[in-house]
Image (spheres, rainbow, N blue to C red):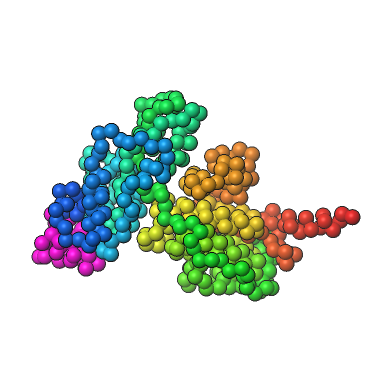
Amino acid sequence: MPSTSAALLFAFGLGQWLEDDPSLLPPSALAPVLASEDIEAGTFPPEVERARRAVAGLDKRPETPPTFDDFASAIEDLPETVTPRRRVWVRHRLRPRERLSQIAARYATTVDDIVNDNRLDPNLDPDRLASRKYRTLRVLARRIPPPRREVITKAAAGETWGDIALRMRVEELDLRSWNWQRRKLDAGRELTVWVDPMAKGFLHPGQGPEPPTTFEVKAGARSRGRPQQGRLDGGLMLPKSELYSRRPGNGGLYGSSHTIEQIQRAFAAFRHDSGYDGEVMIGAISRKHGGPYSPHISHQSGRDIDIRLPLLPGLPTVDHPNPDEVDWYATWALIRSFIDTGEVSVIFLDVSLHRRLYEAARILGETPESLEELITWPSWKGKNPTVKHSAGHDTHIHVRIACGPDEPRCLESNGRKPRRARMARARVAQP
Ligand SMILES: [Zn+2]
């Protein structure tokens, strides 16, 4: 981005350094534009100037952090996130326990860029950055949210660490660590919390495009046999759509009519209900006639769909996103939309990510009870939830659609007739 560097250099009167690659610039050219000492500089677009002042003001740590009961009130008076037209250098002051991947996601850049621009040791553990050595980082930002804010919150009677973490939208481990000297949680106990405005998310609930009332999907494509040993009769190609993108160069996007219809329904509801407008890519369903589809074990009968985890807006699409780059609110909204079709038999996601999904779901209004049958978190005990662990499903979810009413030869993965068929039979058998 030559224009960005040029603008930056112009602003600092360093016109002789017209390098495109910021990592090649001398440290003086990387002088942060958002540091409070630069506040007089003022040759930036107005929106950047606003963000710069807001962030510079917030950077100062108040002597007594304010007290708040919940996340919404803790961020209420903070400025909005600014998206400048050009990338801007920001000096980021590390907050306790902040991860490099979180900082990259915050400014819509990459961990690699931050490592390069700060000449960090590429072998260093990005989760242990908050040492003295790296107290501030230079970040070429695409978006400028307000920094994390230190606040106090009081524990209510009977509240657990998890409850408090949830209402302040922070991770429980972080909360415990910030308050390591507090062994017990008595009512009224004051706790330090580094609230992150990013936890507000980027969804616009109910503001997405209105879903259609009918879905036209060509009938006749039928699933036969089991997902891991089956076929697809008359396979239907996943149609092009504004609702999702299709993995390019992939011949494996054929499904049963029933499956293709549920994809249309779920995605239309998801886009409308969440207002998420980022890319969501469907990677694999089945081959045209089904059957073995390497490297998958299932995906044989036109009912299995691999969907990439939706990323936070502004981030480049990558094959292996860090969990901090994933938009977990959008992920839950998508899963919810699939479940609400009533036609999902199982969803696979690596168990290492279930906590993230669970917390996002709770913040979006689900209760422990409503999630009881949906996800293996916080406990595995006695559950047969819809969202199950499957090793390696950590960059995408795998949704399996139930056998459709017009698919008499479709079987569950255990080889049994689908519940729908058994129920229909039972109904017929009764007088
Ligand atoms: Zn899969």
- Residue appearing at x 65%, y 57% in the figure: 342
Residue 368 shown left or right of residue 412 in the figure: left
Residue 342 shown left or right of residue 105 in the figure: right
- Residue appearing at x 63%, y 42% in the figure: 383
The magenta segment: 1-30
What is the x, y in percent for residue 201? 42, 52
Query: Is residue 24 shown in magenta?
Result: yes
Q: Would you identify the image quadrant in which residue 183 lies?
A: top left
What is the x, y in percent for residue 97? 33, 40
- Residue appearing at x 49%, y 28% in the figure: 157
Of 32 and 406, nearer the camera is 32
Give the vertical position of 136 relative to 43 (above or below). Answer: above
Q: Quadrant of the C terminus?
A: bottom right
Of 86 and 218, nearer the camera is 86
What is the x, y in percent for residue 330? 48, 55
- Residue appearing at x 10%, y 62% in the figure: 13
What is the x, y in percent for residue 413? 67, 55
